[in-house]
Image (cartoon, helix red, strand yellow):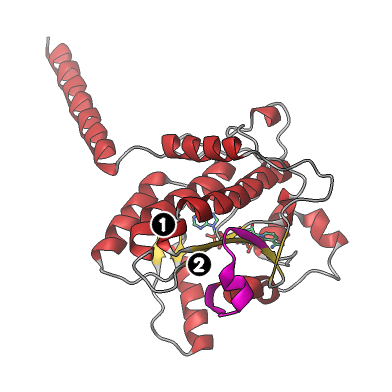
């Protein structure tokens, strides 16, 4: 389990251990909105010679206020897209070594009204933030990315799927969408019901599902990610541009970053020394 908060992560690990009676549940701490954290986690994970069969990109946020990460990227975009993209891309070489590898990205029905958009900083909501629409945009991007990956990595044998869990009464819905929750309170799913298709996509041997790649699922069935007459279809060129943009946004290495940090420390020290000399004079 890859979690950002050690306390919540440990609690979740204990719950899964207890309910599954499986002691082999391990916690990795990583904030998937931060590229540096993802790279550190992957580096460590690769050194451990672990086997990897399946990645579930589940972490996601719908923020009622615009927030930026310490890496100066919009937090909704960083968590929902950079996290999904970078974590998966860095682990593909390991993933493709296993027998029946799968990647599941938890999108949302909130993407139905959104078309692929390149406004990664959400400039359109600069004057008035709209967290639900920004969230929907990133959830559309996850669906596009899934379809793109299935073609790009066709030869690896990895199966890529995106899905909508249905509207479930989770902590996220309670804090981000309280009015929505109140309106739908009698029809919301439990978190367990919401996770059903994720688990099925991860372990099922269903013939139809296994013959598909890059599809969007709801309740154990692939379905169109577009509403009839919705006008949300994107072109192949736009899919490619989106992928290329993500590559550009994430194409720095942790070594470069460490070098930069070292240089900054040296400059800081030199400045301090200059200040000291000035004081003595
Ligand atoms: N619930 C629904 O009705 C619904 C509908 C459609 C789609 N979804 C999707 O389902 C997924 C799960 O949502 P949920 O409803 O269960 O929301 P949630 O209760 O807010 O859970 C989200 C989880 O993501 C983790 N997370 C958030 N940012 C992270 C980061 N930067 N690094 C690592 N972990 C991070 C959170 O960790 P903490 O515990 O540390 O906060 C939390 O465990 C999301 O992708 C969401 O978009 C949910």
Q: Which residues are magenta?
A: 202-216
Q: Is residue 10 left or right of residue 113?
A: left
Q: Are marks 1 and 2 in contact (CB under 8 Å)?
A: no
Residue closest to the eye, 233 or 186: 233
Which residue appears at 79% of the width and 69% of the height? 188
Placement of 170 over or under 74, stated as above or below:
below
Crowd around label 2: few <14 · some 14–19 · many ≥20 (10 Å): few
Q: Is residue 84 above or below residue 245?
A: below
- Is any atom of residue 164 visible in this view? no
Residue 26, how many percent across, how many down? 39, 74
Camera-nearest label, 1 or 2 = 1
Q: Judge left or right: residue 94 versus residue 185.
A: left
Q: Position of residue 60 (x, y in %)?
A: 58, 55
- Of mark 1 and mark 2, the one earlier in the sequence is 2
Q: CA distance from mark 1 to mark 2?
A: 13 Å
Label 2 element class: helix
Q: Tell me if residue 252 comes above or below residue 23 in the rendering.
A: above
Which residue in the protein does label 2 denote? Answer: 8
Q: Residue 155, located in which quarter of the rendered image?
A: bottom left
Residue occupying the point 47% across, 76% down: 13
The answer to if 270 sits in the magenta stretch is no
Mark 2 within 8 Å of ligand 1, using the beta carbon: yes
Ligand 1 position by quadrant: bottom right
Return the x and y of residue 253 as percentages of the image width and height.
30, 41
Residue 205 lies in the magenta stretch: yes
Query: Residue 76 in the image: x percent, y percent?
Result: 59, 44
Q: Say whether residue 268 is left or right of residue 211.
A: left
Residue in front for this viewpoint, 62 or 91: 91
Question: SS for tag 1?
Answer: loop
Q: Which residue is mark 1?
A: 30
Disc 1 Cβ-to-ligand 1 distance below 8 Å: yes
């Amino acid at each position: 389990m890859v979690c950002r908060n050690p306390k919540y992560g440990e609690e979740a690990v204990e719950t899964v251990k207890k309910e599954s009676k499986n002691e082999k549940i391990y916690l990795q701490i990583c904030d998937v909105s931060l590229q540096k954290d993802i790279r550190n986690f992957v580096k460590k994970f690769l050194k451990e010679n672990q086997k990897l069969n399946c990645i579930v990109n589940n972490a996601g946020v719908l923020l009622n206020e615009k927030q930026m990460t310490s890496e100066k990227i919009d937090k909704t975009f960083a968590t929902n897209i950079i996290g999904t993209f970078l974590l998966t891309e860095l682990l593909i070489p390991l993933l493709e070594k296993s027998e029946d590898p799968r990647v599941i990205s938890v999108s949302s029905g909130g993407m139905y009204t959104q078309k692929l958009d390149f406004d990664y900083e959400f400039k359109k909501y600069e004057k008035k933030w709209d967290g639900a629409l920004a969230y929907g945009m990133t959830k559309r991007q996850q669906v596009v990315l899934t379809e793109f990956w299935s073609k790009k990595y066709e030869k690896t044998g990895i199966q890529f799927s995106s899905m909508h869990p249905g509207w479930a009464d989770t902590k996220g819905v309670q804090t981000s969408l309280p009015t929505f929750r109140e309106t739908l309170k009698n029809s919301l799913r439990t978190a367990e019901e919401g996770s059903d298709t994720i688990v099925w996509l991860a372990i099922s041997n269903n013939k139809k599902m296994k013959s598909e790649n890059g599809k969007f699922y709801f309740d154990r069935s692939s379905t169109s990610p577009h509403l009839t007459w919705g006008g949300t279809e994107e072109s192949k060129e736009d899919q490619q541009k989106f992928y290329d943009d993500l590559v550009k946004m994430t194409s720095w290495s942790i070594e470069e970053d460490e070098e930069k940090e070292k240089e900054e420390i040296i400059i800081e020290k030199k400045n301090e020394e200059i200040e000291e000399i000035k004081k003595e004079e």
